[in-house]
Amino acid sequence: MAAALARAQGLDAESAGLDPPAGRRAAPNAIRALRDARGMSLSDHTPQSVDDVRLSAFDRIVAVTPAVARRLRSEHDVPEARLVVWAIPDPYGGSLADYRWCVEQIAMALDDLHHP
């Protein structure tokens, strides 16, 4: 959801997880929440691992939670200067309301990141 919202703001963004489920698509509630809130589609999204992304190609790397930031620092050697840490809980497995809340939190965090 974050990458789709970032791209909608004109940012070059890629989505990657630390432990993405193999062979899965975006969660149905993620697809619906993003479509309902922003008219955007995630139906073609396939989760990918951070191991498959060239992190050095990006000016900033966003960790949606402090726990993700810790793993990015320790397992992927992400420099502190390029790391942006948010505190947005992962809604995976949650209700549609959880995903809708998450969409709004990400949108606000992106606004702060893009327009400091």
Image (cartoon, rainbow, N blue to C red):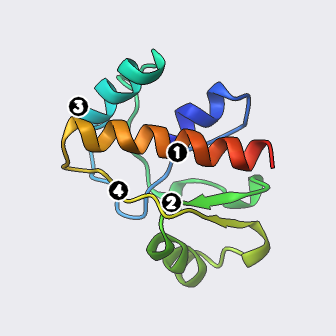
Between marks 3 and 4, how big is the CA–CA gap? 14 Å
- Disc 2 marks a residue whose amino acid type is Val
- Disc 4 marks a residue whose amino acid type is Asp
Disc 4 designates what residue?
90
Residue 53, labelled with which disc? none
In percent of width and height, residue 3 lies at 56, 39
Callout 2 touching callout 4 (CB < 8 Å): yes
Residue 28, labelled with which disc? 3
Q: Is residue 52 above or below residue 24?
A: below
Answer with the quarter of the image where residue 74 lies. Answer: bottom right
In percent of width and height, residue 42 lies at 40, 26
> What residue is at 53 percent from the left and 55 percent from the top?
52
Q: Secondary structure at mark 4?
A: loop
Callout 1 touching callout 2 (CB < 8 Å): yes
The mark closer to the camera, 3 or 4, is 4
Disc 1 designates what residue?
106
Q: Residue furthest top?
A: 39
